[in-house]
Image: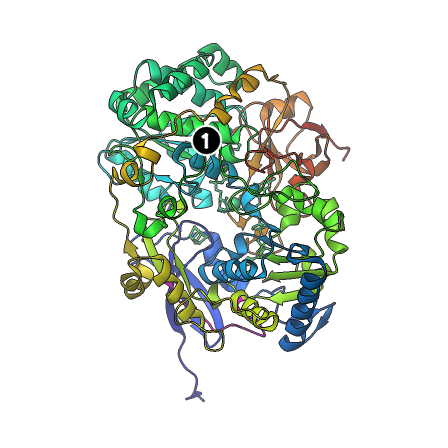
Amino acid sequence: MVDETATAPRQVRFICFLCGASCGLCATVDGDRITKVVADRDHPATRGYSCTKGRSIPEVHHAPNRLDRPRLDGRDVEWPVLLDDLAGKLQSLKAEHGPDSIARFFGTGFFFINEAFGAATFFGALGTQQLYGAMTLDTAPFLRAAELVTGFARSTPVWAPDDPASTLAVIIGQNPSNSGGYSGTPSSNFTQRVRAFRQRGGEIWAIDPRATRTAGMVDRHLAPRPGSDVFIFGWLARELLRDGFDAHELEVACDPDDVEHLRAVVEAFDLELVTRRTGLAEHDLLDLLAAIRRHGRVSLLPGTGVSFSPTAVLTYWLIWAVGIITGSLDRSGGMRFLPESTTMMDGPRRTGHAPESGAFGPGPASRPELKGVFGERPAVALVDEIEAGNIRALMIMGANPVAAAPDPDRLLAALATLPVLAVFDIVEWELTRIATHVIPCTWLAERNDMRFLPQYGAERTYVTPAIVAPGADRRHGWQVLSELGARMGFDIFDVLPGVDAETATDEGLMRAIGRLTCDDADNVFAAGTDGVRVEFRYGWFHEQVLPDGRWRLAPRVLTDRIPGVLASEDTSGPRLVSGRTLASVNSSHYAVPLDEGPPPIRISADVARERAIETGDRVRVRTARGEVAGAVLVDPSMARETVWIAHGWHEQNVNRLTDPAPDPLTGQPSVTGVPVEVERLPS
Ligand SMILES: Nc1nc2c(c(=O)[nH]1)N[C@H]1C(S)=C(S)[C@@H](COP(=O)(O)OP(=O)(O)OC[C@H]3O[C@@H](n4cnc5c(=O)[nH]c(N)nc54)[C@H](O)[C@@H]3O)O[C@H]1N2
Ligand SMILES: Nc1nc2c(c(=O)[nH]1)N[C@H]1C(S)=C(S)[C@@H](COP(=O)(O)OP(=O)(O)OC[C@H]3O[C@@H](n4cnc5c(=O)[nH]c(N)nc54)[C@H](O)[C@@H]3O)O[C@H]1N2
Ligand code: SF4
Ligand SMILES: [Mo]
């Protein structure tokens, strides 16, 4: 007999925000079950592209390890019990030890419009300075270099593959076809974009110690020694200042003293030095230089391979310098900056430009040598602050510091001593097991979202609907923060006209934040998942953002470091290459079946040969800080003397190898280009 009340499965179009590619997808929903997710062939930007993570949304959404119920000290409780207890404890810590006894750690799992807003206003109202997060394990060098060169940390040049004037691009330590992009790369349907760019005569290069998927689809691939990009760009700057510079740009948009100073500091980067330090062949480097001279302008697209290196901030700056010297920034044929309406680029007008040596805040008491950066404190200092007793409550918001930060075992032990460890997450894992307060949050399929971040090279602003209602006893993170705020005597929606805690809905909140931050919000809401294309202009950035219309081409805090780089010893032996895989986002693993273990450690053929290691053997990789063991894959596509270990796995935690000493300019430690020892383990 047919059940007349049963409704047919629905189709829901939505945008996947698991990575920057922002694919248009389509879900089949039967009641409260998501039964299938496929690519949306009609999506105007991604046109039928999807990856395994997006298609595994049904399995992840309904996974048995999803957090379903609030938990207090290991027991399932009702929401009011958890909220009363947590608010009460936070309130008394604040009264007794001050707001700085309460810390937050913010990560990629909270980087969504409503959740990020809720966290910002909650901790702002709480008044704590103890703000930590993935930023100082990821983007801090990128932000610092942008700030030093333009006076504004959020300045992000974006490649324009569709602009016929753009004919040359160089991808540096980024793998957009896997990662969905890092900065400045329009990554929606990246493969198709690259194909179209090359078909119309565009030339594209990749600089990566591994022959990645991205490297496999470009014109030329250079595989340098990990951590050596600084030499490539120092040399390019030197050569282009001799022949290949844009005289007009240097004259009108740079300080003449800066130009001379830069010329002097890069003089030592000669071809002999750069080939020796990078391991690249002379002819490859000369071909790259010739390509830049031939095209005149170039789009330079750095990724985490640059951010994670010991010289990250210097390399970023030299990449900016090459862009400026060649007149490639904010000029047609080079890179553009998204218009200010969509990027909150009025920052410099509201807050003024950062000082020439960078803006810093107060650092943590237990690590006085470390400064605050971009409103946060360096993540590496979290463990010190807990051990010193300065932090008594930690709220972890969509983050996994044990996988992301150095010294994971020490950090895990410190976290277990905290009187309050509140974890806002979606799945059961290492930290939910020791958390005092487990907060089961909604995930992608259960919430509305809006994306307009230029850092992703976004060319469209989108909204996406919730596919299903929140399942089990889950709540949105913002709802929980709002209720905690109410119990502690503040309203996290104070700054939002028309939203109040009692009646706020997920969609209403998204719209209110959207209207506050995006000029074109109503059009964006109307366009839904198709999104609104962001129109680009060249030239406005010089006029409206740069201090007096000029780049700070040669920041002295950076040029002062060049002699140290030149004098540094080049140790031989294997070096670490940072790694991420298609089926995971950091420590979230979306491979179906979901319980697959870590991918093998990849080593280059020479490392294998010298140690008589074969694919399938077990190896131990070691630094002075610790060791990691695992099965090995000999990978002939990797540059000489390189070792790749996937990041984000507990049992094979690559951050056991990481030296936590951060760069004082950025607060960030290095995880790539790190010298390691490799040995075969007895079978
Ligand atoms: N050695 C080494 N270290 C690294 C890196 C590396 O490549 N190598 N990468 C660095 C980088 S780029 C980053 S960004 C950091 C990552 O640092 P984190 O952001 O701290 O780490 P993730 O593993 O992304 O943690 C995300 C957490 O959020 C949860 N989550 C996912 N979706 C949601 C959601 O919708 N709501 C909530 N509430 N939770 C959610 C996940 O289950 C997971 O526990 O690590 C950095 N550290
Ligand atoms: N599938 C998937 N997508 C993701 C993530 C994920 O974990 N998985 N994480 C998300 C996050 S948080 C981020 S920050 C972005 C990161 O996005 P990307 O920056 O594109 O990250 P990767 O894909 O690791 O690409 C970095 C590349 O740098 C290379 N590399 C390593 N060391 C060096 C070096 O010293 N020099 C040079 N030139 N290259 C080097 C590596 O071999 C690698 O191919 O991806 C996001 N998207
Ligand atoms: S590439 Fe994959 S994870 Fe990224 S947005 Fe598209 S479907 Fe989602
Ligand atoms: Mo990241």
Tell me the quarter of the picture where residue 101 sits. bottom right
Q: Quadrant of the N terminus?
A: bottom left
Is residue 464 one of those drawn in magenta? Answer: yes
Q: Residue at x 47, y 65 (%)?
A: 445
- Asked if 189 appears above or below 610 in the picture, the reply is below
* Figure quadrant of residue 255: top left
Left or right? Give the position of 578 relative to 508: right
In this rendering, the answer to whether 629 lies above or below 74 is above
Rendered position, 349 above or below 293: below
Ligand 2 within 8 Å of disc 1? The answer is no
Give the vertical position of 251 relative to 78 (above or below).
above
- Left or right position of 627 against 163: right
Q: Nearer the viewer, residue 675 or 222?
A: 675
Amino acid tagged 1: Tyr
Q: Residue at x 66, y 65 (%)?
A: 438
Q: Position of residue 203 (x, y in %)?
A: 31, 29
Q: Position of residue 154 (x, y in %)?
A: 42, 43
Q: What residue range appears in magenta?
A: 463-476
**Residue at x 56%, y 31% (from the top left corner):** 635
> Residue 418's x, y, as percent?
74, 57
Instruction: Report which residue position mark 1 lands on.
Output: 316
- Viewed as shown, does residue 81 lie left or right of 183? right
| Res 598 seen here | no
Query: Within the image, what quadrant is residue 436 found in?
Result: bottom right
Residue 342 seen in render: yes
Q: Is residue 156 magenta?
A: no
Image mark count? 1
Mark 1: which secondary structure? helix
Q: Residue at x 66, y 20 (%)?
A: 610
The quadrant in which the C terminus is found is: top right
* Percent coordinates x, y for residue 177 in the rendering: 42, 42
